Image (cartoon, coloured by chain):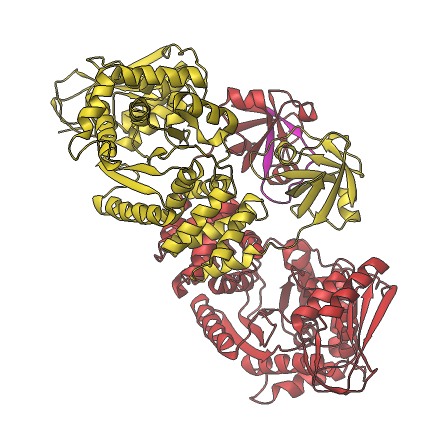
Chain colours: A yellow, B red
Amino acid sequence: MDLKAKLIDISTGDAPVVLITRQAALTYDLHTADRVLLSANDRKVIAAVNTTDHGFGLRDDQIGIYIETALEIDIIEAAPVTITPVSKPESIKYIKKKMDGKELSDEEMRQIVKDIVGRNITQVELTYFVAACSIYPLSFGEIVTLTRCMSDTGVQLHFDKPMVIDKHCIGGVPGNRTSMITVPILMSLGYTVPKTSSRAITSPAGTADTMEVFAEVNLSVDRMKQVVDSVGGCLVWGGSVNLAPADDRIIRVERPLSIDVPGLMISSVMAKKFSVGGTHVVIDIPFGPGAKVETVEHAEQLRRQFVTIGKMLGIRVLVIISNGSQPIGYGIGPLLEAYDVLAVLKNDPSAPHDLREKSLMIAGKFLEFIGHAPRGGGRKIAEAELTSGRAYKKFQEIIDAQGRRELPPLARFKHEVFATAAGIVRAIDNRSVAKVARIAGAPISKSAGILLYTKVGSSVEVGDKLFAVYADNEEKLSTAVSFVATNNPFTLG
Amino acid sequence: MDLKAKLIDISTGDAPVVLITRQAALTYDLHTADRVLLSANDRKVIAAVNTTDHGFGLRDDQIGIYIETALEIDIIEAAPVTITPVSKPESIKYIKKKMDGKELSDEEMRQIVKDIVGRNITQVELTYFVAACSIYPLSFGEIVTLTRCMSDTGVQLHFDKPMVIDKHCIGGVPGNRTSMITVPILMSLGYTVPKTSSRAITSPAGTADTMEVFAEVNLSVDRMKQVVDSVGGCLVWGGSVNLAPADDRIIRVERPLSIDVPGLMISSVMAKKFSVGGTHVVIDIPFGPGAKVETVEHAEQLRRQFVTIGKMLGIRVLVIISNGSQPIGYGIGPLLEAYDVLAVLKNDPSAPHDLREKSLMIAGKFLEFIGHAPRGGGRKIAEAELTSGRAYKKFQEIIDAQGRRELPPLARFKHEVFATAAGIVRAIDNRSVAKVARIAGAPISKSAGILLYTKVGSSVEVGDKLFAVYADNEEKLSTAVSFVATNNPFTLG
């Protein structure tokens, strides 16, 4: 049946929705929450049906197109839209097969990814898939197929280089901004590094949020390609280029339970590396209490999986297992982290030692891995790029190529927290630090966050400053400070 | 923060939704798809946030209340609504525990049910729970707790009788309308039978749909109580009385994958029996190819579970395992099934033998089970109620008490299907019969469906009528007929 489009200014933040009158629903035997296939010109999208009596002055021959729906099919006001009821997608039976604990064939996995990307399956159906993959771990074969399909169904980039380098950190440690230092180092040595990063989901800043303090990070694929071709690499937000779009939908249903399904996580990471044509990839797995990976055994297990999947995909993978037991650097939150990165790149003597050392260690080991340096000789080469100022210069080139932004001022409101007893700093809890910084407004407020004055192992006296909380307004500051009162991230002993 | 209510005429068919302007979202640091807790007067509800620029002329100090949200909190236009961001509900960690394959304590299960009913958990979160219960079967203890909690969180009825009888069929066999015969028989013998039934979800008719041909079935709890007090029982739609509301939400996430989690199914059935104060319950489990339960082993396993759970709840349960290999009676679809029921109750010689026999068998066995008849003597007593016309009279009393409706006319369009070869009817496939009847318009069109002229075991000649398809319009009839061309439910041999 055909209806006329009426664009409706409502955003649901997720699945496409259309609005029809209750009379139209009766006429076409549709029900609220039914799914329909919309076709207009050559584009198709599956949307959920909402109904109304008179909302938006909708007529019975019209169909209201919400914002997410309009983004999927390119449609103008009053254009004809054909709607047909949707039958169950084929992949439902493969999801049920996975729920029964059985291994999926390549074809079955491919169909599931196709239906995820085509939005043929709902969030509930996708959740069954994620739950099944969480309970019955994916086989290596399944992970490889899933990775290939996630990459195939999105944009793929090709650089005409014998070696394309990429880096990924599996996250969970606040302030861990090594990419912003190792990527310029590797680029200044002549390597191609088309790096995409994520924004914070539950943390106070992702690399994309921190990079955005300096430069534009929402680049289209074409712009990203241009930047990489002109300066040899980039530091952009992965969400703005359409790499492995199935992954976004999978992550969205993992988030409510904060689950991280190992096979899905590996596919998620590797699909993006595969999509940019990565030939050599370094994966940083920080472990420690309060990090995503808590034990070295778990980190070792992930290492084996990443390396194996890499081999099966034809990508050489170096996994670095690092100390993730406390935040890296002094600043937590986009602007405060940006200061740390800048201090390291500018060889500022007050630059955080741990961020500098970790960045050099990763760059050095990777140079050995790719044969640029002999075993044990990588760090020295990396350090030379840094101390010479060449890495800093490269970083400035990236900023100019992506589009320079003016640094925001520091947050107006600040509260300092002091030691109430003397002792050694035994621990700084990653989760509490992240929580306080988020309550203070990070990452939405670029300048909000935490500044650590001391790190694990230092001794403090009564009245010494431990850290400061920064916020844009007094309300957020006081909420963050009262959270600290009962959840101080510092353990002295 | 406080906003003013603006009622919005949009129905989403599921979770409560509110609409705020993009400016208000920025001000309050809310994001599209966030969940917020709304409080107005003493009522609370959790709703998802949609955003708009100018939709419905919404102002920044207003909050748009969709229909499902308005149903949950009793609010009038322009009334103040307080909204607060929602943190993760406690039951998320118990759902994760179940995902890890661990048994839940009573308190944990209780919290999950509370959060399901209070809509504190989303469909995605609930799906993880259902997936986990599907993969890691619930223990008897978990099922009993779940049953109690599902009942506790809904309406409960109390009848001042020593014995309250109930009946349930787990379904999957078209035309299986025994309740409409056994309930009047048991009532006419003086028993209290507060029977609630379901409407069709994926079948051509539920008992509630068929009963609705004769009488109102959408009764409030108070009206249901009145009816049972006045005539001794009822045959109403369970969805209109608020028994075990958690169950509806669980079933909604089971449906997309057509999964039936045994532990959840038993809880779903028993919670409703518990809520009406049932002391003696008969459960009919039809099995056979194309029925919900395909093997006798599976039926026996369910029998043991039902009986055990019944004992733990203090309910005596009789399970009858019956032949579900072909449809019961001649008619499929609300009106055509209603004709069959009426024919049996009126002792019409042309009444379907199988429906009559099965109803008498169930009533008879149940009379023996509750001690009304000696072993082997139940059927005779049941048959006396039927042949005497007392059961029919009781059925008329129920109809009058619930509110009599006028029978609709037979569907205008009819297509007969003939045997193209001579032979014996070897099988009539339940699923194809259901599908054809639904395509023809059942249960939305009361008079649409199928009329079987012959059953399994009969011999037919070329040109003999096998069945007729009834529909309200030619389009539906022709779609159903072309489906039959490739999916004829009859197997001759």
Q: Which is more toward the observer, A2 or A15?
A: A2
Q: Nearer the viewer, residue B383 or B46?
A: B46
Q: In the picture, which quadrant includes the C terminus of chain A?
A: top left
Quarter holding residue B61: top right
Of residues A72 and A291, the one nearer the viewer is: A72
Q: Is residue A98 left or right of residue B215?
A: left
Question: Which image quadrant is residue A140 in?
Answer: bottom left
Question: Residue B274: x percent and y percent?
Answer: 52, 63
Q: Is residue A213 above or below residue B411?
A: above
Q: Is residue B344 above or below residue A378?
A: below
Rendering quarter of residue A385: top left
Query: Relative to A84, is B97 on the left or the right?
Result: left
Residue B18 colored in magenta in the image: yes
Query: Can residue A288 be seen in the rendering of this structure?
Result: no
Residue B326 on image: x %, y % = 66, 77
The range drawn in magenta is: B4-19
In magenta stretch: residue A15:
no
> Residue A60's x, y, as percent?
80, 39
